[in-house]
Amino acid sequence: VSEPAKSVGPFGQFVNLIAGTILFMSNSLQKVGIEQSIGLSIVLFTMFVKLLTFPLNEQQIKGTERMGIIQPKIKEIQAKYKDDPNKSAEKLQSVYAENQINPLAGLLPAFAQIPIFIALYRALQNLATDGQMNQPFLWLPNLEGPTFGPIGTNWLFTGFHDGVPQYGWHDTAAYLSLPIFLIFSQIVSQRLLVSKEQYDAQPQWTKFLPIIFGYFSLNVPSGLAVYWVANNIVTTGTNVALKQKFKNDPEVVALRERIAKVDAPVEKPKPYVKPKEIIQDAAPVGMASEQSQAPAASSRGKSEPPKKRKKKKGKKSKKAAAVRA
C-alpha cells in the first residue's frame, strides 16, 4: 500500500500520523501473509487507541458511577426547588461538596478523546479518497464502497437497471447490513452502560443517536463504519468490565452507604399506650358460695385445709334441759 495524501497544519500532522500508522500495520500484516489487511488494521488500531485512552475512560466510568448514586438526590432537589433555580443550584453544590463529587469528572475524559476520534475519522476518509482501502473485509465487498468517492446516499437511490441496484442485491445488502449492525450495537451499548435513572434523565434527542449514526454510515465508505462498529464493541466491553470493578470500589461503596443513611426514613417512637385493666365479672351466687368454700392458698403457695365449723351448743342445751324436766 502506497503512502497516503498529506494533510497540512498541526492537526493535519496528527491525521497523517494516524493514517501512516494504519498503513504500516496493513503492510506488516500483508508481509506475514494476512489478506484483507486494511480492515484488520483498522480494528487493531481502534483497539490500540482504546488502550491508550483507557486511563481517561476509567476516570470517566468512575465519575459516572458516583454521579449515578446521587442522581435520586439530585432529582429530589430539582423537583423541590423547581421554582427557585438559585436555591436549587445552591443545594446541588452542597450535595457535590459533601460527597466530594465533581459533576464534570465524567465529561472531561470524554471531551479529551474527541480530537483523537476526529483525527481517526479524517485519516480513514483520506485513505478512502486516495484509494488506499480498496480491499474486501469479512462480508463487505469493498471498504471504499458503497460511496467510492463522493459522500452521500446517491448510491442507494440511483443507478437502477431493470429494478436491480447498481451494485446488485448481494453487495447492496452487504453494505446495508453494517449500518443496521451499528444501530443495534449502539442501542445495546446505551442500555448496558447507563442506568435506568440516567437513561430517563437524558435529553430525548440522545436516544435517537444510534439511528443518526446508522444513517450517517450510509453516506461514507464502509471502512469508517467498520471503525465505528469496532470502537463501539470495544468501548462497550471495556466499560461493562469497569462498571463491575467499581461496584466494589471502596470510594463508591462508601458513597453508596452514606447516601443510603441520609435517605433512610427516620422511625418515629411509638406513643405509650397504658394497658387496659381487666375487670372480672361477678360470679353467680351459687358459684360464689362454692368459691368461698374452696381452700384458700397460703402465703407459701400451698392450699390450706378447710377450717372446721364450730358447733352451736345453745339449742342443744335447751333441748336437754327440757328433757330433764
Image (cartoon, rainbow, N blue to C red):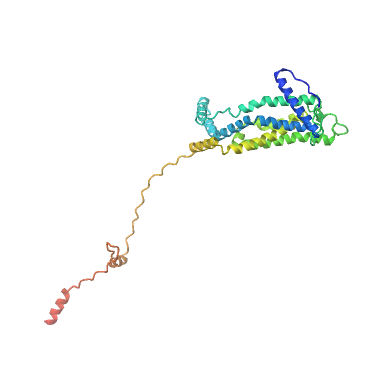
Could you tell me which residue is drawn at 69 percent across and 29 percent down? 49
Quadrant holding the N terminus: top right
Outermost residue, top direction? 9
**Residue 195 shows in this picture:** no
Asked which quadrant contains residue 161, the reply is top right
Nearest the camera: 290 or 297?
A: 297
User: Which residue is at 72% across, 26% downward?
Assistant: 120
Image-quadrant location for residue 203: top right
Number of numbered discs visible in the structure rendering: 0
Q: In this rendering, is residue 171 above or below 272? A: above
Q: Nearer the viewer, residue 161 or 20?
A: 20
* x and y, in percent, of residue 163 in the image: 86, 34
**Horizontal arrangement in the rendering, residue 143 relative to residue 265 (left or right):** right
Please provide percent x and percent y for residue 213: 71, 30
- What residue occupies the far front of the structure in this picture? 32
Q: Residue furthest bottom?
A: 324
Residue sitting nearer the eye, 304 or 284: 304
Residue closest to the far right? 162
Q: Position of residue 319 (x, y in %)?
A: 15, 78
- Residue 155 horizontal side relative to residue 43, left or right: right
Q: Residue at x 71, y 22 (%)?
A: 14
Image height check: is 320 above or below 43? below
Is residue 67 visible in the rendered image? The answer is yes
Residue 251: where, in percent of width, then height?
A: 54, 35
In the figure, residue 301 lies in which quadrant?
bottom left
Quarter in which the C terminus is drawn: bottom left
